[in-house]
Amino acid sequence: MATFALIHGAGDAGWYWHLAERELRRRGHDTIAPDLPCEDDSAGLPEYADAVVSAIGGSSGGRGEVVVVAQSFGGFTAPLVAARVPVTMLVFVAGMIPAPGEAPGDWPAATGFDEVMSEQARRFNGSDMVYHDVPPALAAQARSRARPQSDTPGRDPWPLDAWPPVPVRCVIGTEDRFFPPEFMRRLATDRLGVVPDEIASGHAVALSRPGKLAAMLDGYAVATR
């Protein structure tokens, strides 16, 4: 079976994945979900990738089939991991899709997300944009585990010249208020040439629909064989 290396988003923690991890392990897979050094102002994207590579077990791996899964801002780290250790697939789950040489801080303007977010803010007018479909008690736990996010990894250009030669899948939430589905469909097509798979969920897919997400990830792992 596969090892799923699960990368959380900005200002978050590996705990975000705990329900999806349970579902993946029930299906016979292994999982790792490290905390990235998001509070450390000395850490940039290379150090974020270091944390994931270390959790996988270094460049030699030893885990066999590794699937790297990235949530939101984790999308800038996932391909760096795939460029350093053997992986069988990259999966973006409501993930930011970078372009070579693009600093994360420039991503909102380059992709049109600035305009999208302005429209979403008007549309939802102060309502929860991330956890609106997560059970309230679970959403409260998620908020309590949030960590400060340093702006250091947003400053430097994304260091890869090209995407690693690894199959890529995208998963989007059809009820995502933060990265709305029409925006994500366009981004996946324009930047990766893929049509995303969809789950009826908001932005925090691994908390609101962990079983459905795990089933989809399990299907990807099976397909790679």
Image: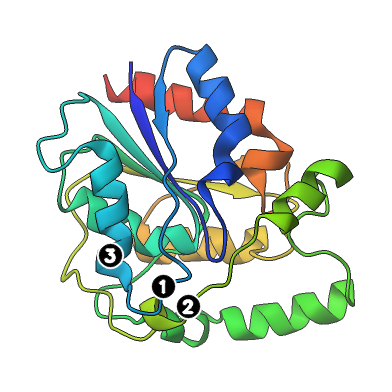
Q: Nearer the viewer, mark 1 or mark 2?
A: 1
Residue 14's tag is none
Task: Please state the horizontal and vertical placement of residue 36, each as a whole percent of the image.
Answer: 42, 57
In this picture, residue 121 sits left or right of residue 18: right
Say if residue 199 shows up in the picture.
no
Q: Nearer the viewer, mark 3 or mark 1?
A: 1
User: Amino acid type of disc 1?
Assistant: Asp
User: Amino acid type of disc 2?
Assistant: Ser
Task: Please state the horizontal and vertical placement of residue 85, each as a whole percent of the image.
Answer: 16, 44
Label located before the other in sequence (3 or 2): 3
Q: Which quarter of the image is occupied by the C terminus?
A: top left
Seen at 67% across and 50% down, the residue is: 204
SS category of the residue bearing label 1: loop
Residue 150's tag is 2
The reply to whether dot 1 and dot 2 touch (C-beta < 8 Å) is yes
The reply to whether dot 3 and dot 1 touch (C-beta < 8 Å) is yes
Task: Please state the horizontal and vertical placement of residue 86, each as a whole percent of the image.
Answer: 16, 39
Seen at 57% across and 58% down, the residue is: 12
Seen at 64% across and 61% down, the residue is: 146
Q: Nearer the viewer, residue 142 or 168?
A: 142
In this picture, residue 134 sits left or right of residue 169: right
Q: Mark 3 highlights which residue?
A: 47
Q: Please count the marks in the image.
A: 3
